[in-house]
Image (tube, grey):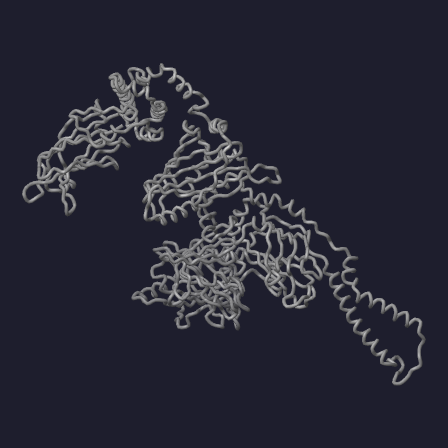
Amino acid sequence: MKLLVRVVEARGLLAVHVNGTSDPFVKLQLGKRRAKTAVVKKNLAPVWDEEFSFLVGDVTEELAVSVLNEDKYFSNDHLGRVKVPLSQVMDTDGLSLGTAWYQLQPKSSKSKRKCRGEICLRISLSTRTHMSEELHPLPRPTSDGVSSSSDRSIGTKRGALSTTNSYIDLSAVASLDRGSQSSFERSADSFVDQPPRSSVEQAATEPGTSAETDAVANTSSMVEVLSRYFFRKPADAAVPAVVSDAESVVDQSPESKVCSEERESPENRAPPESSLDELLKIMESKDQGAEMPAKLSNGVLVDESYVTAPAGLNTLLFSPNSDFWPAVAELQGTSGFQIESWKIDSNDGCLRRTLSYIKAASKLVKACKATEEQKYLKAAGNSFAVLSIVSTPDVPCGNCFKIEILYCITPGPQLSSEEQTAHLTVSWRINFVQSTMIKGMIENGAKQGMSEGYAQFSEVLSQKFKVAELDDANANKAKILASLHTQKEPSWRLIVRFLGNFTFIVSVIVGIYIITHLHLSKPKAMNGLEYFGIDLPDSIGEVVVCAVLILQGQNIMKVMKRFLNAWKQRGSDHGVKAHGDGWILTVALIEGSGIIAGGSSGLFDLYAVFTCNAKRKTSSIKFHTSEPKWNEIFEFDAMDDPPSRMDVAIHDSNRSDGDPIGHAEVNFLKSSLSDLTDIWVPLDGKCDPASNPKLHLRIFLNNSRGTEVVMNYLSKMGKEVGKKINLRSAQTNSAFRKLFNLPPEEFLIDDFTCHLKRKMPLQGRLFFSPRIIGFYSNIFGHKTKFFFLWEDVDDIQVIPPTLSIGSPSLMVILKKDRGSEAKHGAKGTDNNGRLKFHFQSFVSFGDAQRIIMGIWKMRSPGPEQKGEIIEESELKELPAEESGSLFSHEDVKMSEIFSSVLSVDVESLMEMFSGGQLEHKVMQKTGCMDYSSTEWELVNRNIYQRQINYKFDKALSRSGGEASTTQQKYALVNQDGWAIEEVMTLQGVLLGDYFSLQLKYHMANVPAKPNTCSVQVLLGIAWLKSTKQQKKVTKNIMSNTSNRLKELFSEVEKDLTSRNGAS
């Protein structure tokens, strides 16, 4: 449907030039389609008499007609405009407004000159689509014989229009209901599906006038159809078929009948409602044995195998009723997703369909519409190939390129469970149809967008089907391990290995000979200096024989010692099964190669030690070899958290110092589990590097708890932290893993905005996951990124606020020689050579502290794993002095704000600081909401420490806010009582970052009065920044804190006395 507009003339236009004239022209716009007339020089009543046509895409649009004055040097002057809605044209009976004068309106309603002249227009709607015009290429008569440039271009076109274009044009009619639109599209499809006319058909239609009459009749029938649809009027008669008499005449020829029969044959034309399987069978019947297309040049986006049949994977990806693409669209933020049905192309016999959607806006490109045309290149048996061409004309230079994506589905690897697998390969390339200067920028942007999009594609697909590689490795685990035949060395072979040498045999023979000699010889008389019991050699020969026997005896003793040591250590942890549920690590030690001493030709008695999460597994000893063959299997007991690394050490059983001669590390965060199933690990240490020492390992890591392991971990973590931790979205976890190149089993727990303190503070985000702490910053394109393992953390310290930083900060200290890859983010090293990472300026320090301390405690090994009785990891406050005082500001003046004598003893009063029910009850009554506290932990010989967090009630603080408190308690030296020091920082309170509060509670029993104690509370304010409101703030804090303490201790005394009275 087209809108026809004839711009006839104008009158009474405004004079812009000094000479009282204007150079007017008319600019027309319908939606995004524009046109303009010629310029009439120096005229206030110009005559244009030009006609324009616009393709109607939306009946709710309006035609904007603007009259402008041409200005060659500056912007054109606006003379007036008029807007005509299309609905006004469609409300008329003949779909035409006729020739009429329209009053020109000013551009702004504030304009003083309201009278701007009139313009004469003739506006009408034509229901003859460009499709029918091209099928009937006859010149369209006009009233005055003048046609616009658009009409002239249409009149010169020849040939049939494609089905896709006709569908798009007809689907632009937005006011059709679903049933009417589908029936109208079917009639249009039947009209378009006719093949191009032969020379006989053209000869029949061009000369005669009957063809023109038929064309007019067909046009009128189409007008009746559209009129009935638009105005919802009942049809007086059935809609006539859109077939001309000329075509019916041609159909009488035998040649035409043959063509018609072939066209209507079921083999060549599939029913419109055919399923994908039926269409694929039709396509497969015509397959000529073509090979699978090669991968596209720009790279592979997906290369995975899934546990499903190839036909099942093909149905999920390309069936019209599949919910896969809508799920991907939801994850990617895509909207307006529409999928057409598959249709067989009559030209090449391949299946085609079109997808359209609106891509979500990115940082550089706004939301835009994308059209994706999919075509089956191959469908034979269990092999499928689909080529998708994506067009995004609305993006910058979008008309210059198209994205081509190739999906190839083939049978996957065979599993031991005999389940079918399908291998999916998705490759892509960018096809530039026009040259552009920003080709490199487009390629880089497309590469990044495709990688991110198909990472989400793979994530959704893995939720539908299991990935075969990981399952295949675990499924074949038993088969692989069963192929390892471990041969335990029998005792007699060990005896022969150590005692079957020439030296030992000769020594045994000499020993037997000497014993026989002693038995046969007779005692001699004592000669020389011999005394009773002392028999000295009587000749030089006897002296030499004695020396040889002594040396030989020493050698025999060494051999016997090595033999007994080998006999004692000949066992190993091979074959010991794992216990429990969780992450189970299985290591198969196959063999070693090139393990010789550096600078010597000596051989070692080798055995291997594997350490993971503080658990050890030891292999058997292989004697006097540089190429040991073990074939031993070790299983670590189930772990709650996935392991981060495994240390491998090779020892020599003859070395007394216990130092390894070679060591290696297996990092599970840097290696995929499929790569670990068969690897050679190079060894570092005292081995000769020229011999390339290495170990052959097979490592398997699987989770016996299934998908519940993540939720169980978060639940356990929530109990440790004191608040519920929700699982992040799949998109967030995917972006987190991609940012730090982490394996699929890693997930994000929480992240916080903070500053990394080095020479200059660097703003970024701190990420926490079960195995790593990561930091990322991007300041004007300068990226800083690093992460280190929780296993490498040796200590975490809380640094109190300072004058420059108004809130506490965290100091993370790694173990010695750990975290070298994150060294560029460290503030420095301490005296022991440990890296220190300083994080400060947290938005919510309390939440960040609870999360990081909770994860660190969960990752810390238990007492039984450490081999000694150690309490849980201790939270250490960084003291300002060696005295251990919590107060870091000595110059703060402490003033007494509360003093009282309570009728309870100190032991009962300390229940207020125990973190129990009484403390929570009293603090909530005094306006402290969401109160949480940690357990008291020993930080020094007699000093205990804990952390407290709570929010202020509106009655306590008008603006709300949050308090983070650190308390230390210790027993008084010369009195029966306790002292508690407290440092409080405020967030979300007016001027809260300008100061910190220091309180000291002094509680002691009164000797003269039983069940009585005295309480004294001192308060000091450490000002971190100067302000004019310092005196006012100090006065308010003193008053409010004093009243709050009176209420607090009064409630405690009342509760304790009532309890004691009841008992």
* Tag count: 0
In this picture, is 807 found above or below 751?
below
Work out which quarter of the rendered image holds the N terminus and state it.
top left
The residue shown at (39%, 46%) is: 446
Give the x, y percent position of residue 954: 36, 54
Picture coordinates of residue 447, whole percent (x, y): 41, 47
Outermost residue, left side: 19
**Viewed as shown, does residue 457 lie left or right of 88?**
right
| Residue 344 in view (yes/no) | yes
Viewer-nearest residue: 361 or 955 = 361
Task: Locate residue 255: give its quadrant.
Answer: top left
Above or below for 418 versus 191: below
Is 1021 left, or right, of 121 in this rendering?
Answer: right
Q: Position of residue 440 (x, y in %)?
A: 37, 49
Q: Position of residue 310 (x, y in %)?
A: 53, 35
Q: Is residue 62 left or right of residue 302?
A: left
Q: Looking at the picture, does residue 601 appear above or below residue 455?
A: below
In the image, 670 versus 548, the foreground residue is 548
Q: Would residue 977 be visible to someone looking at this image?
A: no
Instruction: Name the image quarter holding the C terminus.
Output: bottom right
